[in-house]
Structure formats: C-alpha cells, structure tokens
Image (tube, rainbow, N blue to C red):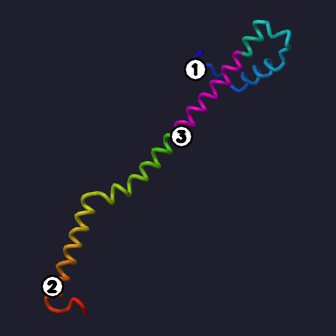
Amino acid sequence: MPLLLQDVQGPEDREMLARLAASVDVQDVQSADSEAAIEKYLRSVLAVENILTLDRLRQEVAVKERLSVKAKSPRRALSSPSVNRVRNEITRSIDLHLKALARFGLAGA
C-alpha cells in the first residue's frame, strides 16, 4: 500500500488515532473501527518516516556532492594546462638566467 503525503493527518489527528490505537482492548481488535483506526495511524506514522528518510537521503547526497566538488577543485587547478605552462616558462627563464650568469662567470658567486 503506497503511502502518500495526503495520508498524513495533522498532529491532533495522529494523537487521537494513537490514543485510540493504544486504548483498544484485545477483544476489540476484531472490530472494523478499531482496525481501521490502527491502520490509519500506522499509515500516517509510516508516511512521516518515509518523508524523514527521503529528506535524510537528500541531505546525504547534497553533502557528498559538496565534498566531491571541494576535493576535485584543487586537483583540477593543479593539473590545468595553464599552471603547467607557467611552471615550464618559469623553469626555462631560470635556466636562461643561469646560463647567462655562467657565461659571465657569475653562476657560482
């Protein structure tokens, strides 16, 4: 039996159904009214549980997505072609300066 949001009654209705379900004697369990009240109460409780479970799952997915985005960002920046290009240009520039200094005998100074 699928539980729908419309099956959830207000807090007063759930409280009344809970009291009715708790007050049912063992002999009265066979009556259709008490069975219907218990079933209606259980449906409303299960509907609330389903809503809370779905909300918890949505929150877990949102947290995992945020964490994966944070974890991927630095790696992506470090591996981007522009960072590698700048690093290579700096290395070449340093090499050229060292060669120029070596030509003038200033590399070891």
Q: Secondary structure at mark 2?
A: helix
Residue at the (81%, 20%) spot, across then down? 22
Quote the CA–CA distance across marks 3 and 1: 21 Å
- Which quadrant of the figure has residue 15? top right
From which residue to which does the magenta span run?
A: 39-58
Judging depth in this view, the residue of 66 and 41 nearest the camera is 66
Circles 3, 2 touching at the beta carbon (< 8 Å): no
Disc 1 on helix, strand or loop?
A: loop
- In the displayed structure, 81 sits above or below 21; it is below
| Mark 2 crowdedness (10 Å alpha carbons): few <14, some 14-19, many ≥20 | few
Q: Which kind of residue does numbered mark 3 sit on?
A: Gln
* Marks 3, 2: nearer the viewer: 2
Residue position for label 1: 4
Q: Nearer the viewer, residue 64 or 8?
A: 64
The numbered dot on residue 100 is: 2
Q: Point out the frontmost of discs 1 and 2.
A: 2
Residue found at x 43% / y 53%? 71
Q: Relative to 44, does residue 58 appear above or below in the rendering?
A: below
How far from the left and from the top, in percent, is residue 56?
Answer: 57, 37
Q: At numbered mark 3, what does the secondary structure look like: helix, strand or loop? A: helix
The N terminus: image quadrant:
top right
Instruction: Residue under label 3, please give it.
Output: 59
Q: Nearer the viewer, residue 89 or 14?
A: 89
Q: Earlier in the sequence, mark 1 or mark 2?
A: 1
What residue appears at the point 20 percent right and 78 percent down from the top-left corner?
Answer: 95
Image-based side of 102 in relation to 43, left or right: left
